[in-house]
Amino acid sequence: MKIKLIKVGKTPVDFDVTSDEITFKGYLEYDSGKLILLKANLNGFTLCQCSRCGEEFKLEVDEEVKFFICDGVFDSDANIDLDVVESFDSTADIDELLNSEIELIKSDYHSCNNCKTE
C-alpha cells in the first residue's frame, strides 16, 4: 500500500495492512514543513530466532510505532525527538515500513520459553 505524501493533511489518513500474522494499523498526519507523522500499532506474531539456543519460535508483538516521514532530504539541524524516514518519491510505502519494523523487532535479543525457564 502506497500513500502519496501530498495527499496527507491535518486530517489523518488511516491505513491497515497485514503481513503474515502481524497487523500494522494507524494513520499519517501532516506535522510541519516536509514532515508527516506516522503513528500506528503493530499487533500479532512473527517468527523469531532465540538469541540463546538458536531455535525458531513465534514472538508475540504488541508495540506502538511513532516516527516522521520526510518528503525529501531531512534537515538534520531540526530539533525533533522522533526518528525520521526519508522518502525520495513523495510516497509512504506502508508495506515496506511494516517489513522494516518487523525486521527491527527480530534484530533485538529474544529468548524462547525453554531458555526463559533455565
Image (tube, grey):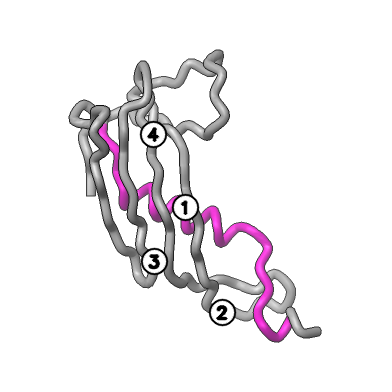
Regarding mark 2 in the picture, which secondary structure is present there?
Answer: strand
**Image quadrant assignment for residue 5:** top left
Give the magenta-colored segment's residue range. 91-115
The reply to whether dot 3 and dot 2 touch (C-beta < 8 Å) is no
Of the residues shown, which amino acid type is indicated by label 2? Answer: Phe
| Residue receiving disc 1 | 101
Residue 105 % position (x, y)? 55, 58
Within-10-Å neighbours for mark 1: few <14, some 14–19, many 20+:
some
CA gap, disc 4 and disc 1 = 16 Å
Q: Is residue 104 toward the left or the right of residue 113 in the image?
A: left
| Residue receiving disc 2 | 57
Of the residues shown, which amino acid type is indicated by label 3? Answer: Ile
The reply to whether dot 4 and dot 2 touch (C-beta < 8 Å) is no
Mark 4 vs 2, N-terminal side:
4
Q: Is residue 113 toward the left or the right of residue 101 in the image?
A: right
Residue for point 56% across, 18% down: 79
Mark 4 vs 3, N-terminal side:
3
CA gap, disc 4 and disc 3 = 21 Å
Residue for point 41% across, 20% down: 73
- The image quadrant where one finds the C terminus is bottom right
Regarding mark 3 in the picture, which secondary structure is present there?
Answer: strand
| Residue receiving disc 3 | 22
| Residue receiving disc 4 | 37
Residue 56 % position (x, y)? 57, 78
Of the residues shown, which amino acid type is indicated by label 4? Answer: Leu
Residue 115 % position (x, y)? 74, 81
For the residue pair 89 and 94, the one nearer the viewer reads as: 94
